Amino acid sequence: MKESPGVPSTSASNHQQHQDRKRKRPSRQPADQKSSQQTLQSLYSKPHSPAACSTSPSHKRQRPDDSSAPPATPPPNSLAMADMYSFSSRSPSTASNGVIDLTNGSSPATPRRINGSVKSGINPHTGAKKLVVKNLKTNTSWDSKAYLEKIWGQLDEALALIFKDGQQGFSKEDLYRGVENVCRQGGASTLFSRLEARCKSHVERDMREPLVEKAGQDHVTVLKAVLAEWARWKKQMTVIRAIFFFLDRSYLLSSSKPTLDQFTPQLFRSVVFSHELLKSKIVDGACELVAGDRTSTAALDKDLYQQAIDMFHDLGTYTSTFEPRFLALSQDYVSEWSEQMITEKSIPEYVALADELIAKEIERCEEYKMDSSTRRELLSLLEDHLIVRKEADLTDYDALSTLLENYAMADLKSLYALLARRSLGSKLRPSFEKWVDKTGTDIVLGKESDDMIINLLSLKRSLDQMWRSSFQRDESLGHGLRESFETFINKTKKGDATWGTDNTKVGEMIAKYVDQLLRGGVKAIPEVLTARRSSSITALPGQQPDAPVEDNEEMEVDEDAEVNIQLDQVLDLFRFVHGKAVFEAFYKKDLARRLLMGRSASADAERSMLTRLKTECGSGFTQNLEQMFKDIELAREEMQSYKQRLEDRLGFEKGKKLDLNVNILSSAAWPTYPDIPVIIPANVKQAIDDFELHYKSKHTGRKLDWKHALAHCQMRATFSKGSKELVVSSFQAVVLLLFNGLKDDEHLTYAHILSETGLPEPEVKRTLQSLACAKLRPLTKHPKGKDINETDTFTINGNFEHPKYRVKINQVQLKETKEENKETHMRVAEDRNFECQAAIVRILKSRKTISHQELVSEVIKATMSRGVLAVSDIKKNIDRLIEKDYMEREEGNMYSYVA
């Protein structure tokens, strides 16, 4: 240890200061120890005068002066200071330059005593001394280069054995220690350079050359050979790394050179894999394994393929070499496969095979841990060739219409799911709309109109289920479905069904179907539409639906709920109808029959339907319908008042007089009924006159028109086999009363019945036909036949019988005749012309001047809710208004309003 020149040594002075601090500390010691302390104090400290002590800044109290005390003798075992710090008399050897050699065995200088105090041999005023510490180890004659050569010789022999796949003949532990020693002596760089050269020589000579000789063989064979050498090389390097582990961790890890883990694939890649004769065959060999699996010509060797993928990953050549080649060959295969399958297979078969191919390719990528980039790019090219480039074939109308007609839910779901992979599901919309429009048009404009609503509801229900299940509620297809229904439902065709008018037949048939539901209740619902079926979604007529899906599980509902469900479904169709005037006219007429004849199955269902119509069309649409219900309620109260008055005045007894019930109807709210002349029996005439007198006494200024065609009655009839109570119409009752008092064999001629009843001839024939030619025949026609002739005669049917006491005879007036149907259509068409003319006038009054095209467009918008006329009919109404001087033509195909 050396001290810097000019810095005084402080070892002795520090010791002196330490002793001074010890002397200043107060102590409570025994007397002998105190005397000993004083003796030592006298050796180390200088005498102090009392004055000096008193002037000390830290002095508080003056201690007793001990100078007069006799000097204490040290105890025998006490060590004198001179003995404690005695050294050999020989002073350390000091060089002339002031350097002290501490390695010399001489002792320090003996301390000197000055004025009773001991002074060390070091004089602080002489300057610092330079201390020199010499190396105690002796120099050896070690040769590190010779040791390196010795260890490398052992390592070289071991490497030779390892490269021959041997594991015996050397000690790994000794070799490891040898490598460690060489690295510690600075030979790590040389050692790695020799190892690198030795390994490279081995790979080139023992591995690459045999593989190059096999390069002429097929790709798979070359791949197998390379994989075998790669596995062998990794095994050899595992042993080598264990021996050179210290080199790897201590030198290579912190240097720019590759570690042994990195060196293993780098050397094999640069020497073997990158060889021009081997590289393409190795990659193509792996691709041929997949190609054989795709074409089913050879089963995929899973172990071999997995080893190849792992090798590509280990060598770092997967992304740069294998993946591009694999994707290029895959694209060629998929392109050829899709072209072949789309021409040879049907669309459902192609979709199934395409789904299977995609699933198999992605499963292979996941099973063999191929990169996510490979899966992504492979999936992209699969979808591009199988879906995007085949979009026209997959969305072709002919192919889709076959699936729709067969109600192939599963195939449609697969087709949509395949297209949805590239967000192309909405591309089915044009073909889907075309099929829906064609199918619906055939139903609406077809000849069989009786089942029109049933077929439309079945079609709507089937397509709704198809949209929810197969098309995954696709928004675009949903809009297409609604637009298609709106298009074909409002198609009109002038023909016999609509009596040459532009009226839509759908409105009429919806009204009749609602009448059927409200009259018959749940019994009137067709089985094909009931919600309580095991599959509530049915196919089109004549088709078999697929197996029920989850949404079609059996539904248990009560009768009222069943009727409400059917009304909701009918209302779905009603929403698509533009011309609601036809529906209103027929619904109003049918409602009147139900209310007057008491034929409604449920008053709640009637009110429920009225509420639905009010919500859908507004209060203006249902104003007259609501008034009809009010009239029935008021008529019921009026009849109660009349009967009470009759009992109070005449003492009316039930069963002895005619039981009359009358409904007073508002002519503005109810349909218009014709006045049919008829000769009323005297007792009935008297009861009618009595009620009319009572009514006019309460309501002055009102006129009553009796509509006998709407009346019905219950009458007792006696036959040879028993008495019955017949429920008949008023016209039937008038005819049956003519046979009172006649025997079973007495005949009445057709002419006699015609003159006695006063009915028009068509009504007489229709009434006699219902009484003598229907299933229940209280009268017998002579001769027998279905048609009524003027020469026919009629007698009482003595063999009439029925298991029930009350028998309902077919009431002709409850069924709509052709004349009534024609009259309704003609009235609706005429009302539409009036509405069209009113709309034209309103538009002209607001615009004053307007072009022809604009006028036609505005009229169509204004009259859409009540029913749109054809453009030719709109032109006719314009001409009528010009003739009436409401408007006039101007130049430039313009119209102006005439104030």
Image (spheres, helix red, strand yellow):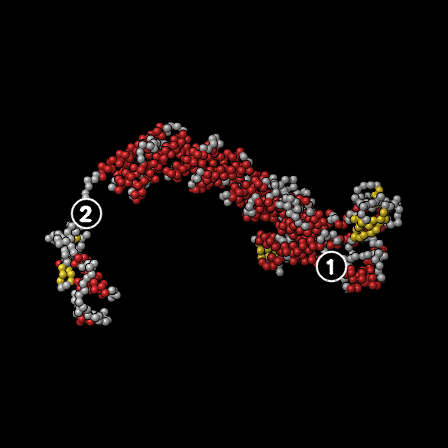
Q: Which residue is mark 2?
A: 135
Q: Nearer the viewer, residue 417 or 200?
A: 200
Q: Is residue 433 visible?
A: no
Q: Residue at x 56, y 48 (%)?
A: 479
Q: Nearer the viewer, residue 708 or 855?
A: 708
Q: Residue at x 21, y 58 (%)?
A: 77
Residue 617: give x, y in percent of width and height.
64, 55
Q: Amino acid at mark 1?
A: Glu
Q: Amino acid at mark 2?
A: Asn
Element on which disc 2 rests:
loop
For the residues marked 2 and 1, what is the alpha-carbon distance in whole angstroms? 133 Å
**Left or right of residue 330: residue 41:** left
Q: Which mark is residue 362?
A: none
In contact (CB < 8 Å): disc 2 and disc 1: no
Residue 151: give x, y in percent of width and height.
26, 36
Q: Residues within 10 Å of mark 1 (few under 14, many from 20)?
A: few
Q: Nearer the viewer, residue 221 or 405?
A: 221
Task: Place residue 697 in its image quadrant.
Answer: bottom right
Q: Is residue 260 above or below residue 808?
A: above
Task: Place residue 744 in its image quadrant.
Answer: top right
Q: Is residue 171 visible?
A: yes
**Left or right of residue 651: residue 388:** left
Q: Residue at x 54, y 42 (%)?
A: 416
Q: Which mark is residue 633?
A: 1
Residue 154: give x, y in percent of width and height.
27, 34
